[in-house]
Amino acid sequence: MQPPARITVSVPAKLNLGLAVGARRPDGFHPLDTVFTALDLCDTVTAGPAERFRLEVHGPEAGTVPADSGNLAWQAAALLAAHTGRAATGTLVIDKRIPVAAGLAGGSADAAGALLACRALWQLDTGTDELLALATRLGSDVSFALTGGTARGTGRGELLQPLVAPALHWVLAAAAGQLSTAAVYAEFDRQPPAAPDPVLAHGLLAAVRAGDPAALAPLLRNDLQPAALALAPYLRDTLAAGQAAGALAGLVSGSGPTCAFLAADAGHARQLAEQLAADCRFAVAVTSGHTPTVEAGS
């Protein structure tokens, strides 16, 4: 069969609606209990044929992203090739729209996109369970990035329980600056000891399944938020600005520095984004529950 000339995968950013983090395990990872949701803020990963493998990164922040083996998408393609016993070939082009080092798992999304794009380009029969196993080896968020939607994540985030949940409306906003996930976890470890077995807030899953923003608002939680605020105190101003603008609730997204604000509906989200845009690096209204898409082109 003639291979497709181009495969384009759209991969969403993620938001943790609840993020309970336990004390670091002997293997260096932290146990999590979290609810992931995928947003309609996406990177695209396009794979095309070429004799040798190479990677290009485009977009407003492309200059801050490696285009070599330091990129998780490159590592994903290499891992899939090694797993299937073939050479890594082709060109991967990443169009980055997810802000970099922003707590939105853009790198994990690109890795998931590379797995899906290369599987299609190389015409592999690698099943979803195999891809999920490879995703887990690449990073804790890559498994969810591969499936999208909304899901509860346990273990270190790689054990997923899909949730059927209506779309919710959010605004993502961040001031200038980036935060390293590793640095935030290191700061978390320096703070008072965490419980060994983290548990989500009671009622959170029911509120997510119901798609009820009023019920969800008081249950939003991110155990990494104090560490992020310690490293980037200016995030307090962003959170306060969202509350002043009328958000139902706000929290730091993942390891930050993006803050996520819950809106009552789509119109409310647009209004919040307009109010926050003047003082933030970015402010964008998004909806939850999206999944990756794969398209073949000529």
Image (spheres, rainbow, N blue to C red):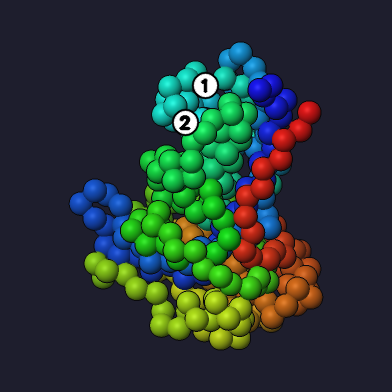
Q: Residues within 10 Å of mark 2 (few under 14, many from 20)?
A: many
Q: Quadrant of the N terminus?
A: top right
Query: Percent from the top left, x then y, of residue 117?
Result: 61, 35
Residue visible at 39% across and 74% down?
200
Q: For the residue carrying disc 1, how many other residues have a C-alpha within 10 Å: few (<14), some (14-19), or many (20+)?
A: many
Snapshot quadrant of residue 170 = bottom right
Q: Is residue 12 above or below residue 297?
A: below
The residue labelled by disc 1 is 88
Mark 2 → mark 1, Cα distance in angstroms? 8 Å
Badges 2 and 1: C-beta atoms under 8 Å apart? yes
Percent from the top left, x then y, of residue 247? 66, 79
SS assignment at label 2: helix
Q: Position of residue 175 (x, y in %)?
A: 63, 59
Residue 80's disc is 2
Which of the pair 54/252 is nearer the observer? Answer: 54
Q: Is residue 12 above or below residue 49?
A: below
**Location of residue 291 in the rendering, given as x and y in whole percent from the top left corner:** 62, 55
